[in-house]
Image (spheres, rainbow, N blue to C red):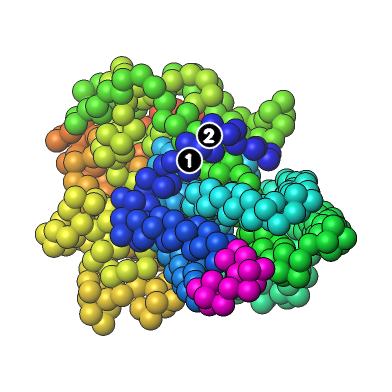
Amino acid sequence: MTERPGAKATLAIWREMIGRSFRMAPWVASALMFLLVVDVVSFVAVGLALREIVDGTGRADATAIAVGAVGAALAYALQLVAGSLAGSAHTTLVEYVAITQIQPETLEIATGIETLEHLERPEFLNRLDIVRAEPYAVINSAWSSIEAVSLVTRLALSLAVLGSVSPYLLGLLVFAAAPLGLEQIGRPRIQRAETAAAEARRVERHLFSLATTASSSKEIRVAGVAEELVERQRVAWNEWLRIRTRARFAAAGWSATGWLVFGVGFLGALALVVMTSGTAGDLVLAITVGAQLRFAVETAVRSTSAVGGAGRVIGPLLWLRGHRAAAAGTGPALPAPTALRDGITLDGVSFGYPAEDTTSQRLAVADVSVRLPAGSVVAVVGEYGSGKTTLVKLLAKFYRPTAGAIRVDGVDLADLDTASWRSRLSAAFQDFGRYLTTMSESIGLGDVERAGDPAAIARAVADADAQVLVDKLPQGLDTELGRQFGGVELSEGQWQKVALARASMRQRPVLFLLDEPTASLDAPSENAIFERYMARARASAAATGAVTLIVSHRFSTVAGADLILVMDAGRLVEVGDHDTLLALGGRYADLYGLQADAYAAG
Ligand SMILES: Nc1ncnc2c1ncn2[C@@H]1O[C@H](COP(=O)(O)OP(=O)(O)OP(=O)(O)O)[C@@H](O)[C@H]1O
């Protein structure tokens, strides 16, 4: 999956990065530009002063030697100061732009894509990981490309001085090309290795977080699987290390060969100077400037390495941007309705999760056609893995149907603006989030626009039957949640209540999705909540024609629904209300009977 960005794309990114540097930190960026100019000027001054010393020595001119010596000392000092300040300015800029611009961009890309598929695809996650790990490389390469201009100037000047000592020394140019050229051979290997190692790194991180997260740690300890996890993490680290080390060794070999060639060339050139009766002054000048040349070449290698090496991050960054742009879709998007007149219709809807091998892709939802009338309470039941949650995700537009269409009052959901549609939804998911912040914020974030509205939060708390929980917390709604940051830890059921309260923040949704909203709660809590939600569903139905869709495994919960959808292996096998389905004596009746027997036996 290594993609090398083209020269045009790389130049465009550099221009963008330099532009951002000047916008974000104009003083530091301008200072860096100025210091680079000072660096070159002082380099020229050192050369000229050395030339003066050598000429003065030849003429036995003490004044010229003294002027040359003072000039060389001053110019050298200036060069050191400018070089060091430029280094600091460079690091500051790189860090600042990487952290304030590129790092947030990765999160924006990941969260900005409306659907969820990308978060399950390794090719997306691997690239995200690369850019997140090294956002500095992008901006660093942009500034290194500018510094390269000053380096080329320095190289040219060194060679001019050396050429004036002896034309043979110009041959060093050929030898200087060796370290630069051979570096180009090693670098792509490192680049490919970084990309190839990204997956092993993700595996390593996953295992680390699995082993250090409180929730999974319990199972790990009971099952005694910790050692196995450590071993697997070690294997993943080793794999990461092996791929990178091999490439780095190979690149180091090429680089060492290049420097060997340069060293041999330098020695040969000096021998030629001596043999062609150069003066002692010429020899000293050749050695001094030659050493400077070596330094300039070394810096050039480092900087071309930063410039060229950034391809491994620029490539993935451009890919991620492209992916986001492609996912944004085209065409005009319609605003979502504020109320439903007719309802939501599923027309031959099928969906299969993306699979590596598309030929063996299984449909999680297969050819489902049903009408969810405006104002109705709809329950979805079925065995584990029958496609209930997938149906909810399709309605929330997290995925697009692979076939068929979902219509909202006759308008294809695909044509509705996703943000607008989501602003008309309320949803509580089975795998709810835990926001580690205050209780009130954790609830309020269910509706950003009213996140700080105490009345809205109080109503959401009441709807989710969470007042008892709030009363138990040491600082009520102001209590910090989550032990990781020093707050109060909640039980699974309490977290679920917080999620439910969050989902209750929007008072006038047109679709209320509840995917097993009470799975972690006890039966009395579930009953209390369900009654409230039924009442709420009826009130919403009257106000906005809202459809409330509840996924549940508990049949006592769903019996009061207007419409029950029975799913089996992705298919909708039965539709109707409780009495109709019982009378049908089919799948629903079987499942209902099983659960009733289980309760009776219990
Ligand atoms: N993110 C995913 N990637 C790939 N396959 C998935 C994904 N989520 C679910 N599936 C598959 O899709 C099918 C339907 O899953 P879904 O979660 O919709 O079932 P469900 O009826 O909600 O199950 P449960 O009652 O366990 O919540 C299952 O076979 C499952 O393995």
Point out the stretch of residues depicted in magenta: 50-67
Using the image, determine if residue 558 lies above or below residue 397. below
Quarter containing the N terminus: top right
Magenta stretch, main secondary structure class: helix
Q: Amino acid at mark 2?
A: Ala
Query: Image quadrant of residue 481?
Result: bottom left
Relative to 149, 259 lies left or right: right
Q: How many residues crowd mark 2 within 10 Å: few (<14), some (14–19), many (20+)?
A: some
Spatial separation of the CA atoms under disc 2 and disc 1: 6 Å
Q: Say if residue 230 shows up in the picture.
A: yes
Left or right placement of residue 189 versus residue 515 in this view: right
The three-letter amino acid code for the residue at tag 1 is Ile
Secondary structure beneath dot 1 equals helix
The one of 348 and 377 positioned closer to us in this rendering: 348
Q: Are marks 2 and 1 in contact (CB under 8 Å)?
A: yes
The image shows residue 549, relative to residue 363, as above or below, that is below
Magenta segment includes 52? yes
Q: What secondary structure is found at the residue carrying circle 2? A: helix
Across and down, in percent, residue 207 comes to 66, 65
**Residue 584 shows up from this direction:** no
- Residue 33 location (% of width, % of height): 40, 55
Q: Tell me, yes or no, whether the highlighted magenta stretch contains residue 493.
A: no
The residue drawn where x is 34% and y is 46% is 427
Q: Tell me the residue at 42%/65% (across/down).
A: 89
Q: Mark 1 and ligand 1: say if the CB distance to the nearest ligand atom is below 8 Å.
A: no
Tag shown at residue 9? 2
**Residue 163's spot in the image, x, y percent?**
70, 51
From the viewer's perspective, is residue 11 above or below residue 79? Answer: above
Q: Which residue is mark 1?
A: 13
Write the residue at 60% across / 33% down: 6
Residue at 23% across, 52% down: 448
